[in-house]
Amino acid sequence: MQAWSKLSKMPAPAIRKLQNELLQKMLSEELAVRHPYYRELFKKENINPADIKGVEDLNKLPFTDKKDVLAPEDDPLYPKKFVLETPAGEEQKGKKKGFSLFGKKDTGPDPADYKFFTLYFTAGRTAKPVPMEYTHYDLDNLREAGARAFDILELTRDDTLINAFTFAPNAYFWQMFYSTIGTGSTALQTGGGKVLGMEKILKAMDSMEAPVLVCAPGYARFALQTLDHFGFSASNLERIVIGIDYAPQSAVDRISGLMKAVGAKDTKVQRMYFVSEAKSGWAECGPGTGYHTNPDHVLVEVVDPESGKVLGEGEKGEVVVTMLDGRGTVFLRFRTGDIATGGITTEPCPHCKRTVPRIMGDIERKGLYLELQGKDGPVRFNANKLREMMFAREGVLLWYAEINPGESGESVKVVLKGTSGSDEEKLLVAVQEELQNEFSVPLEVESSTLDAVANKIGLEKFITEQVIFDNRSS
Ligand SMILES: [Zn+2]
Protein backbone atom coordinates (compact mmCIF):
# COMPACT_ATOMS: atom_id res chain seq x y z
CA MET A 1 0.00 0.00 0.00
CA GLN A 2 1.36 3.40 -1.00
CA ALA A 3 0.97 6.71 0.82
CA TRP A 4 -2.03 8.30 -0.91
CA SER A 5 -0.69 11.85 -0.63
CA LYS A 6 2.39 10.78 -2.63
CA LEU A 7 0.68 8.34 -5.00
CA SER A 8 -2.06 10.75 -6.04
CA LYS A 9 0.56 13.25 -7.24
CA MET A 10 2.98 10.84 -8.93
CA PRO A 11 3.63 11.53 -12.63
CA ALA A 12 1.99 9.01 -14.98
CA PRO A 13 5.28 7.25 -15.94
CA ALA A 14 6.10 6.65 -12.25
CA ILE A 15 2.61 5.20 -11.70
CA ARG A 16 3.11 2.94 -14.72
CA LYS A 17 6.48 1.76 -13.34
CA LEU A 18 4.89 0.99 -9.98
CA GLN A 19 2.09 -0.95 -11.69
CA ASN A 20 4.63 -2.94 -13.74
CA GLU A 21 6.44 -3.98 -10.57
CA LEU A 22 3.23 -4.88 -8.75
CA LEU A 23 1.96 -6.84 -11.75
CA GLN A 24 5.16 -8.89 -12.02
CA LYS A 25 5.08 -9.57 -8.30
CA MET A 26 1.41 -10.60 -8.39
CA LEU A 27 1.95 -12.91 -11.37
CA SER A 28 5.15 -14.63 -10.33
CA GLU A 29 4.87 -14.66 -6.53
CA GLU A 30 1.12 -15.14 -6.12
CA LEU A 31 -0.89 -16.32 -9.12
CA ALA A 32 1.66 -18.76 -10.59
CA VAL A 33 2.43 -20.20 -7.16
CA ARG A 34 -0.71 -20.29 -5.04
CA HIS A 35 -3.71 -19.48 -7.21
CA PRO A 36 -5.36 -22.78 -8.25
CA TYR A 37 -7.16 -21.41 -11.32
CA TYR A 38 -4.39 -19.28 -12.85
CA ARG A 39 -1.59 -21.70 -11.88
CA GLU A 40 -3.40 -24.36 -13.92
CA LEU A 41 -4.27 -21.97 -16.74
CA PHE A 42 -0.66 -20.72 -17.07
CA LYS A 43 0.55 -24.33 -17.34
CA LYS A 44 -2.15 -25.31 -19.83
CA GLU A 45 -1.56 -22.30 -22.04
CA ASN A 46 2.22 -22.36 -21.64
CA ILE A 47 2.37 -18.92 -20.09
CA ASN A 48 5.58 -17.99 -18.34
CA PRO A 49 4.92 -15.11 -15.90
CA ALA A 50 8.54 -13.98 -16.41
CA ASP A 51 7.60 -13.07 -20.00
CA ILE A 52 5.18 -10.45 -18.71
CA LYS A 53 7.48 -7.54 -18.04
CA GLY A 54 4.73 -5.04 -17.46
CA VAL A 55 1.37 -3.60 -18.34
CA GLU A 56 2.14 -3.47 -22.09
CA ASP A 57 2.51 -7.29 -22.10
CA LEU A 58 -0.88 -7.86 -20.47
CA ASN A 59 -2.48 -8.75 -23.80
CA LYS A 60 -0.43 -11.96 -23.73
CA LEU A 61 -2.66 -13.10 -20.87
CA PRO A 62 -6.21 -14.38 -21.35
CA PHE A 63 -9.27 -12.55 -20.03
CA THR A 64 -11.37 -13.88 -17.19
CA ASP A 65 -15.09 -13.76 -17.99
CA LYS A 66 -18.15 -13.86 -15.77
CA LYS A 67 -18.83 -17.40 -17.01
CA ASP A 68 -15.31 -18.48 -15.95
CA VAL A 69 -15.98 -17.56 -12.32
CA LEU A 70 -19.51 -18.96 -11.99
CA ALA A 71 -19.65 -22.21 -10.04
CA PRO A 72 -21.11 -25.17 -11.95
CA GLU A 73 -24.23 -26.66 -10.29
CA ASP A 74 -22.38 -29.76 -9.10
CA ASP A 75 -19.30 -27.95 -7.78
CA PRO A 76 -20.17 -25.62 -4.88
CA LEU A 77 -16.49 -25.35 -3.91
CA TYR A 78 -15.53 -24.00 -7.33
CA PRO A 79 -15.12 -20.35 -6.11
CA LYS A 80 -12.16 -21.61 -4.01
CA LYS A 81 -10.23 -21.99 -7.27
CA PHE A 82 -9.93 -18.19 -7.36
CA VAL A 83 -8.66 -17.86 -3.79
CA LEU A 84 -4.94 -17.60 -3.04
CA GLU A 85 -3.76 -20.53 -0.94
CA THR A 86 -1.98 -19.89 2.36
CA PRO A 87 1.80 -20.24 1.94
CA ALA A 88 3.21 -23.52 3.25
CA GLY A 89 5.66 -23.58 6.15
CA GLU A 90 8.58 -24.73 3.94
CA GLU A 91 8.15 -21.77 1.65
CA GLN A 92 8.84 -19.51 4.58
CA LYS A 93 11.85 -21.37 5.78
CA GLY A 94 13.21 -21.64 2.27
CA LYS A 95 12.91 -17.95 1.65
CA LYS A 96 16.18 -16.13 2.05
CA LYS A 97 16.07 -14.02 5.16
CA GLY A 98 18.05 -10.91 5.88
CA PHE A 99 18.07 -7.27 5.13
CA SER A 100 17.20 -6.31 1.61
CA LEU A 101 17.19 -2.93 -0.05
CA PHE A 102 15.35 -0.11 1.74
CA GLY A 103 16.32 -1.72 5.02
CA LYS A 104 13.21 -3.91 5.11
CA LYS A 105 13.54 -7.41 6.46
CA ASP A 106 12.62 -9.93 3.79
CA THR A 107 10.79 -12.65 5.63
CA GLY A 108 8.67 -14.03 2.81
CA PRO A 109 4.89 -14.13 2.66
CA ASP A 110 3.00 -13.81 5.91
CA PRO A 111 0.36 -16.59 6.29
CA ALA A 112 -1.79 -14.21 8.35
CA ASP A 113 -2.38 -12.09 5.21
CA TYR A 114 -4.07 -15.06 3.54
CA LYS A 115 -6.38 -16.00 6.38
CA PHE A 116 -10.06 -15.91 5.42
CA PHE A 117 -11.95 -13.05 7.07
CA THR A 118 -15.29 -12.56 5.32
CA LEU A 119 -17.27 -12.94 2.11
CA TYR A 120 -18.70 -10.08 0.08
CA PHE A 121 -20.76 -11.03 -2.95
CA THR A 122 -20.85 -9.50 -6.40
CA ALA A 123 -24.09 -7.75 -7.39
CA GLY A 124 -25.29 -10.54 -9.66
CA ARG A 125 -27.06 -8.16 -12.02
CA THR A 126 -26.39 -10.25 -15.10
CA ALA A 127 -25.41 -13.57 -13.56
CA LYS A 128 -25.59 -15.29 -10.20
CA PRO A 129 -23.70 -13.50 -7.38
CA VAL A 130 -20.12 -14.71 -6.96
CA PRO A 131 -18.59 -14.92 -3.47
CA MET A 132 -15.42 -12.86 -3.06
CA GLU A 133 -13.17 -13.92 -0.17
CA TYR A 134 -11.65 -11.08 1.80
CA THR A 135 -8.75 -11.49 4.22
CA HIS A 136 -7.69 -8.90 6.81
CA TYR A 137 -5.18 -7.72 4.22
CA ASP A 138 -8.06 -7.01 1.79
CA LEU A 139 -10.05 -5.34 4.53
CA ASP A 140 -7.15 -2.92 5.10
CA ASN A 141 -7.20 -2.14 1.37
CA LEU A 142 -10.99 -1.66 1.43
CA ARG A 143 -10.65 0.78 4.33
CA GLU A 144 -7.89 2.60 2.47
CA ALA A 145 -10.01 2.75 -0.71
CA GLY A 146 -12.84 4.18 1.39
CA ALA A 147 -10.61 6.82 2.95
CA ARG A 148 -9.27 7.81 -0.46
CA ALA A 149 -12.78 8.06 -1.92
CA PHE A 150 -13.79 10.39 0.92
CA ASP A 151 -10.65 12.46 0.29
CA ILE A 152 -11.66 12.80 -3.37
CA LEU A 153 -15.28 13.62 -2.45
CA GLU A 154 -13.95 16.11 0.12
CA LEU A 155 -15.99 14.54 2.89
CA THR A 156 -14.67 15.14 6.40
CA ARG A 157 -15.60 14.33 9.98
CA ASP A 158 -17.73 17.48 10.06
CA ASP A 159 -20.13 16.03 7.48
CA THR A 160 -23.00 14.18 9.11
CA LEU A 161 -23.93 11.44 6.69
CA ILE A 162 -26.89 9.16 6.07
CA ASN A 163 -25.68 5.93 4.48
CA ALA A 164 -28.69 4.54 2.60
CA PHE A 165 -26.79 1.95 0.58
CA THR A 166 -28.58 -1.36 1.03
CA PHE A 167 -27.18 -3.42 3.90
CA ALA A 168 -25.81 -6.60 2.36
CA PRO A 169 -22.56 -8.52 2.23
CA ASN A 170 -21.11 -6.47 -0.62
CA ALA A 171 -18.23 -4.05 -1.09
CA TYR A 172 -20.52 -1.02 -1.63
CA PHE A 173 -22.19 -0.94 1.75
CA TRP A 174 -19.07 -1.94 3.65
CA GLN A 175 -16.67 0.44 1.94
CA MET A 176 -19.04 3.27 2.81
CA PHE A 177 -19.34 1.96 6.37
CA TYR A 178 -15.56 1.83 6.83
CA SER A 179 -15.15 5.24 5.20
CA THR A 180 -17.33 6.89 7.82
CA ILE A 181 -15.62 4.98 10.64
CA GLY A 182 -12.23 5.97 9.22
CA THR A 183 -13.03 9.68 9.00
CA GLY A 184 -14.88 9.66 12.29
CA SER A 185 -17.89 11.44 10.84
CA THR A 186 -21.31 11.19 12.44
CA ALA A 187 -23.13 8.66 10.31
CA LEU A 188 -26.33 6.71 10.39
CA GLN A 189 -25.93 3.34 8.70
CA THR A 190 -29.58 2.95 7.74
CA GLY A 191 -29.16 -0.27 5.78
CA GLY A 192 -31.18 1.34 3.00
CA GLY A 193 -34.87 1.16 2.23
CA LYS A 194 -34.87 -2.59 2.61
CA VAL A 195 -33.96 -2.30 6.30
CA LEU A 196 -35.27 1.06 7.53
CA GLY A 197 -37.75 2.14 4.85
CA MET A 198 -38.10 5.48 3.10
CA GLU A 199 -40.06 7.30 5.79
CA LYS A 200 -37.52 6.60 8.55
CA ILE A 201 -34.58 7.44 6.31
CA LEU A 202 -36.12 10.81 5.41
CA LYS A 203 -37.03 11.42 9.04
CA ALA A 204 -33.44 10.70 10.12
CA MET A 205 -32.09 13.04 7.45
CA ASP A 206 -34.38 15.76 8.67
CA SER A 207 -33.94 15.30 12.43
CA MET A 208 -30.14 14.75 12.31
CA GLU A 209 -29.86 17.80 10.04
CA ALA A 210 -27.59 15.68 7.86
CA PRO A 211 -26.09 17.51 4.90
CA VAL A 212 -25.01 14.31 3.09
CA LEU A 213 -27.11 11.43 1.78
CA VAL A 214 -25.49 8.36 0.20
CA CYS A 215 -27.68 6.07 -1.89
CA ALA A 216 -28.36 4.47 -5.26
CA PRO A 217 -29.46 6.98 -7.93
CA GLY A 218 -32.98 5.60 -8.36
CA TYR A 219 -33.55 5.71 -4.63
CA ALA A 220 -32.30 9.32 -4.45
CA ARG A 221 -34.81 10.31 -7.10
CA PHE A 222 -37.62 8.47 -5.36
CA ALA A 223 -36.68 10.01 -1.98
CA LEU A 224 -36.70 13.56 -3.33
CA GLN A 225 -40.00 13.01 -5.09
CA THR A 226 -41.75 11.59 -2.01
CA LEU A 227 -40.32 14.02 0.55
CA ASP A 228 -43.41 16.19 0.35
CA HIS A 229 -45.73 13.24 0.79
CA PHE A 230 -44.04 12.31 4.08
CA GLY A 231 -43.89 15.94 5.20
CA PHE A 232 -40.15 16.18 5.80
CA SER A 233 -37.78 19.00 5.01
CA ALA A 234 -34.58 18.83 2.98
CA SER A 235 -33.43 22.26 4.09
CA ASN A 236 -30.18 20.91 5.55
CA LEU A 237 -29.36 18.67 2.62
CA GLU A 238 -26.27 19.82 0.72
CA ARG A 239 -25.19 16.86 -1.31
CA ILE A 240 -26.05 13.37 -2.44
CA VAL A 241 -23.42 10.76 -3.25
CA ILE A 242 -24.79 8.22 -5.70
CA GLY A 243 -23.35 4.84 -6.55
CA ILE A 244 -23.93 1.13 -7.24
CA ASP A 245 -26.36 1.56 -10.12
CA TYR A 246 -26.40 3.26 -13.52
CA ALA A 247 -25.58 6.93 -12.93
CA PRO A 248 -25.16 8.84 -16.19
CA GLN A 249 -24.40 12.55 -16.03
CA SER A 250 -28.05 13.22 -16.86
CA ALA A 251 -29.03 11.44 -13.61
CA VAL A 252 -26.71 13.79 -11.73
CA ASP A 253 -28.39 16.79 -13.35
CA ARG A 254 -31.87 15.40 -12.64
CA ILE A 255 -31.14 14.73 -8.96
CA SER A 256 -29.52 18.13 -8.62
CA GLY A 257 -32.65 19.72 -10.12
CA LEU A 258 -34.89 17.82 -7.72
CA MET A 259 -32.75 18.94 -4.76
CA LYS A 260 -33.31 22.51 -5.84
CA ALA A 261 -37.04 21.92 -6.21
CA VAL A 262 -37.38 20.61 -2.64
CA GLY A 263 -35.42 23.54 -1.21
CA ALA A 264 -32.14 21.83 -0.39
CA LYS A 265 -29.38 24.06 0.99
CA ASP A 266 -27.07 23.08 -1.85
CA THR A 267 -27.48 20.81 -4.88
CA LYS A 268 -24.18 18.95 -5.16
CA VAL A 269 -24.36 15.42 -6.59
CA GLN A 270 -21.25 13.22 -6.74
CA ARG A 271 -20.83 9.80 -8.32
CA MET A 272 -19.05 6.62 -7.29
CA TYR A 273 -18.38 3.57 -9.40
CA PHE A 274 -18.03 0.24 -7.63
CA VAL A 275 -16.56 -2.90 -9.15
CA SER A 276 -17.11 -5.90 -6.87
CA GLU A 277 -14.40 -7.88 -8.67
CA ALA A 278 -11.94 -5.05 -7.99
CA LYS A 279 -13.00 -5.20 -4.32
CA SER A 280 -13.59 -1.44 -4.14
CA GLY A 281 -15.26 1.65 -5.52
CA TRP A 282 -13.88 4.88 -6.93
CA ALA A 283 -15.16 8.43 -6.65
CA GLU A 284 -15.42 11.46 -8.89
CA CYS A 285 -14.07 14.76 -7.51
CA GLY A 286 -16.28 17.01 -9.62
CA PRO A 287 -18.95 16.76 -12.31
CA GLY A 288 -17.67 14.60 -15.17
CA THR A 289 -14.03 14.49 -13.95
CA GLY A 290 -14.00 10.70 -14.04
CA TYR A 291 -13.67 7.98 -11.43
CA HIS A 292 -10.27 8.32 -9.72
CA THR A 293 -8.87 4.78 -9.46
CA ASN A 294 -6.30 3.36 -7.03
CA PRO A 295 -3.42 2.33 -9.30
CA ASP A 296 -1.57 0.45 -6.56
CA HIS A 297 -4.60 -1.74 -5.82
CA VAL A 298 -6.12 -2.36 -9.23
CA LEU A 299 -4.99 -2.10 -12.82
CA VAL A 300 -7.73 -0.87 -15.14
CA GLU A 301 -7.71 -1.51 -18.88
CA VAL A 302 -10.32 -0.43 -21.41
CA VAL A 303 -10.76 -2.90 -24.27
CA ASP A 304 -12.90 -3.30 -27.38
CA PRO A 305 -15.92 -5.31 -26.17
CA GLU A 306 -15.95 -7.38 -29.36
CA SER A 307 -12.31 -8.01 -30.27
CA GLY A 308 -10.77 -7.59 -26.80
CA LYS A 309 -8.12 -5.25 -28.23
CA VAL A 310 -6.69 -2.84 -25.66
CA LEU A 311 -7.87 0.67 -26.56
CA GLY A 312 -6.06 3.99 -26.38
CA GLU A 313 -6.80 6.76 -23.90
CA GLY A 314 -10.23 8.30 -24.21
CA GLU A 315 -11.66 5.51 -26.35
CA LYS A 316 -15.04 4.08 -25.35
CA GLY A 317 -14.79 0.43 -24.31
CA GLU A 318 -15.21 -2.29 -21.71
CA VAL A 319 -13.63 -1.90 -18.27
CA VAL A 320 -11.25 -4.77 -17.41
CA VAL A 321 -9.74 -5.08 -13.93
CA THR A 322 -6.68 -6.86 -12.56
CA MET A 323 -5.93 -7.00 -8.84
CA LEU A 324 -2.40 -5.75 -8.23
CA ASP A 325 -2.52 -5.97 -4.48
CA GLY A 326 -4.89 -8.42 -2.89
CA ARG A 327 -5.29 -11.72 -1.11
CA GLY A 328 -8.33 -13.99 -0.87
CA THR A 329 -10.22 -14.03 -4.17
CA VAL A 330 -8.11 -12.57 -6.98
CA PHE A 331 -9.03 -12.04 -10.63
CA LEU A 332 -6.75 -11.32 -13.55
CA ARG A 333 -8.01 -9.30 -16.53
CA PHE A 334 -11.64 -9.63 -15.43
CA ARG A 335 -14.15 -8.36 -17.99
CA THR A 336 -16.73 -6.35 -16.04
CA GLY A 337 -19.33 -5.99 -18.79
CA ASP A 338 -19.31 -2.25 -18.00
CA ILE A 339 -18.71 0.16 -20.86
CA ALA A 340 -16.91 3.41 -20.02
CA THR A 341 -18.22 5.85 -22.62
CA GLY A 342 -15.19 8.14 -22.15
CA GLY A 343 -12.55 5.40 -21.79
CA ILE A 344 -9.61 5.93 -19.45
CA THR A 345 -7.13 8.78 -19.07
CA THR A 346 -3.79 9.19 -17.29
CA GLU A 347 -3.77 12.98 -17.70
CA PRO A 348 -3.81 14.88 -14.39
CA CYS A 349 -7.35 15.75 -13.27
CA PRO A 350 -8.15 19.32 -14.33
CA HIS A 351 -10.22 19.81 -11.17
CA CYS A 352 -8.17 18.32 -8.31
CA LYS A 353 -4.82 17.84 -10.10
CA ARG A 354 -4.50 14.24 -8.89
CA THR A 355 -2.59 12.06 -11.35
CA VAL A 356 -4.19 8.64 -10.82
CA PRO A 357 -5.84 7.01 -13.88
CA ARG A 358 -9.45 8.11 -14.29
CA ILE A 359 -12.36 6.21 -15.89
CA MET A 360 -14.26 8.76 -17.94
CA GLY A 361 -17.84 9.34 -19.08
CA ASP A 362 -20.85 7.26 -18.10
CA ILE A 363 -20.79 3.57 -17.26
CA GLU A 364 -23.18 1.61 -19.47
CA ARG A 365 -23.98 -2.09 -19.30
CA LYS A 366 -22.78 -4.14 -22.27
CA GLY A 367 -25.70 -6.50 -21.62
CA LEU A 368 -28.17 -3.67 -22.29
CA TYR A 369 -27.05 -3.12 -25.88
CA LEU A 370 -29.86 -5.22 -27.27
CA GLU A 371 -31.05 -6.31 -30.66
CA LEU A 372 -34.72 -6.84 -31.40
CA GLN A 373 -36.08 -8.95 -34.22
CA GLY A 374 -38.33 -6.71 -36.25
CA LYS A 375 -40.49 -7.46 -39.28
CA ASP A 376 -37.69 -6.38 -41.61
CA GLY A 377 -34.76 -7.83 -39.69
CA PRO A 378 -32.81 -7.03 -36.50
CA VAL A 379 -33.01 -3.55 -34.97
CA ARG A 380 -30.58 -2.20 -32.38
CA PHE A 381 -31.98 -1.06 -29.06
CA ASN A 382 -29.73 0.55 -26.44
CA ALA A 383 -31.62 0.03 -23.18
CA ASN A 384 -28.97 2.14 -21.39
CA LYS A 385 -30.31 5.10 -23.35
CA LEU A 386 -33.88 4.21 -22.36
CA ARG A 387 -32.81 4.16 -18.70
CA GLU A 388 -31.14 7.53 -19.13
CA MET A 389 -34.20 9.11 -20.74
CA MET A 390 -36.65 7.71 -18.22
CA PHE A 391 -34.45 8.76 -15.30
CA ALA A 392 -34.28 12.31 -16.54
CA ARG A 393 -38.00 12.49 -17.46
CA GLU A 394 -39.97 14.90 -15.34
CA GLY A 395 -43.24 13.60 -13.96
CA VAL A 396 -42.12 9.96 -13.79
CA LEU A 397 -41.98 8.56 -10.26
CA LEU A 398 -41.19 4.91 -11.03
CA TRP A 399 -41.04 2.85 -14.21
CA TYR A 400 -39.83 -0.33 -15.89
CA ALA A 401 -39.64 -1.73 -19.39
CA GLU A 402 -40.40 -5.17 -20.80
CA ILE A 403 -39.01 -6.56 -24.02
CA ASN A 404 -41.62 -8.92 -25.36
CA PRO A 405 -41.71 -11.49 -28.15
CA GLY A 406 -44.55 -11.29 -30.64
CA GLU A 407 -45.73 -12.82 -33.88
CA SER A 408 -45.25 -9.62 -35.83
CA GLY A 409 -41.86 -8.90 -34.24
CA GLU A 410 -40.39 -8.11 -30.83
CA SER A 411 -41.44 -4.94 -29.03
CA VAL A 412 -40.83 -2.78 -25.95
CA LYS A 413 -43.44 -1.94 -23.34
CA VAL A 414 -42.75 0.83 -20.82
CA VAL A 415 -44.86 0.85 -17.65
CA LEU A 416 -44.78 3.92 -15.42
CA LYS A 417 -46.28 5.62 -12.41
CA GLY A 418 -46.39 9.40 -12.56
CA THR A 419 -45.55 11.71 -9.68
CA SER A 420 -48.49 12.83 -7.59
CA GLY A 421 -50.35 15.67 -9.22
CA SER A 422 -49.14 14.84 -12.72
CA ASP A 423 -51.62 14.45 -15.56
CA GLU A 424 -50.95 10.81 -16.38
CA GLU A 425 -52.83 10.77 -19.69
CA LYS A 426 -50.77 13.67 -21.01
CA LEU A 427 -47.57 12.14 -19.60
CA LEU A 428 -48.14 8.83 -21.38
CA VAL A 429 -48.64 10.54 -24.74
CA ALA A 430 -45.57 12.75 -24.30
CA VAL A 431 -43.28 9.90 -23.16
CA GLN A 432 -44.52 7.68 -25.98
CA GLU A 433 -43.63 10.37 -28.50
CA GLU A 434 -40.20 11.09 -27.03
CA LEU A 435 -39.23 7.43 -26.91
CA GLN A 436 -40.56 6.71 -30.38
CA ASN A 437 -38.47 9.59 -31.72
CA GLU A 438 -35.34 8.08 -30.18
CA PHE A 439 -35.81 4.37 -30.84
CA SER A 440 -36.77 2.58 -34.03
CA VAL A 441 -38.38 -0.39 -32.29
CA PRO A 442 -42.15 -0.86 -31.74
CA LEU A 443 -42.90 0.74 -28.40
CA GLU A 444 -45.90 1.29 -26.16
CA VAL A 445 -46.22 3.19 -22.89
CA GLU A 446 -48.82 2.54 -20.23
CA SER A 447 -49.39 3.45 -16.59
CA SER A 448 -49.85 1.28 -13.53
CA THR A 449 -50.27 1.67 -9.77
CA LEU A 450 -47.45 2.65 -7.41
CA ASP A 451 -47.60 -0.74 -5.65
CA ALA A 452 -47.50 -2.74 -8.87
CA VAL A 453 -44.51 -0.85 -10.28
CA ALA A 454 -42.64 -0.77 -6.94
CA ASN A 455 -43.14 -4.52 -6.54
CA LYS A 456 -42.07 -5.32 -10.05
CA ILE A 457 -38.79 -3.35 -9.83
CA GLY A 458 -38.03 -4.58 -6.31
CA LEU A 459 -37.95 -1.14 -4.70
CA GLU A 460 -36.65 -1.54 -1.12
CA LYS A 461 -36.32 -5.27 -1.82
CA PHE A 462 -33.24 -5.61 -4.00
CA ILE A 463 -29.85 -3.85 -3.64
CA THR A 464 -30.97 -1.59 -6.49
CA GLU A 465 -34.10 -1.67 -8.60
CA GLN A 466 -34.35 -3.81 -11.71
CA VAL A 467 -36.00 -1.86 -14.53
CA ILE A 468 -35.35 -3.81 -17.74
CA PHE A 469 -37.06 -7.17 -18.13
CA ASP A 470 -36.22 -9.20 -21.20
CA ASN A 471 -39.10 -11.66 -21.60
CA ARG A 472 -37.74 -13.22 -24.78
CA SER A 473 -35.36 -15.72 -23.20
CA SER A 474 -37.70 -17.00 -20.48
ZN1 LIG B 1 -10.05 15.07 -9.65
Image (cartoon, grey):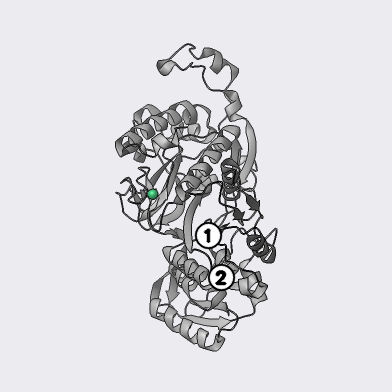
Q: Position of residue 238 (x, y in %)?
A: 52, 60
Q: As shown in the figure, which amino acid type bears the numbered disc 1?
A: Ile
Q: Residues within 10 Å of mark 1 (few under 14, many from 20)?
A: many
The label on residue 149 is none
Q: Is residue 210 above or below residue 310?
A: below
Disc nearer the start of the sequence (1/2) = 1
Image point 66% across, 65% down: which residue? 198
Instruction: Say which quadrant the C terminus sits in.
Output: bottom right
Numbered label tally: 2
Q: Nearer the viewer, residue 5 or 56?
A: 5
Q: Quadrant of residue 435?
A: bottom left
Q: Residues within 10 Å of mark 2 (few under 14, many from 20)?
A: few
Q: Nearer the viewer, residue 471 or 325?
A: 325
Q: Is residue 201 left or right of residue 307?
A: right
Q: Is residue 252 above or below residue 50?
A: below
| Residue at the spot of label 1 | 240
Q: Nearer the viewer, residue 467 or 211?
A: 211
Image point 56% across, 49% down: which residue? 158
SS of the residue at dot 1?
strand
Is residue 83 visible in the rendered structure shown here?
no
Q: Position of residue 466 (x, y in %)?
A: 57, 65
Q: Position of residue 339 (x, y in %)?
A: 41, 56
| Residue at the spot of label 2 | 471
SS of the residue at dot 2?
loop
Q: As shown in the figure, which amino acid type bears the numbered disc 2?
A: Asn
Is residue 5 visible in the rendered structure shown here?
yes
Q: Quadrant of residue 354?
A: top left
Query: Is the CB atom of the residue marked by disc 1 within 8 angstroms of ligand 1's nearest atom?
Result: no
Q: Nearer the viewer, mark 1 or mark 2?
A: 1
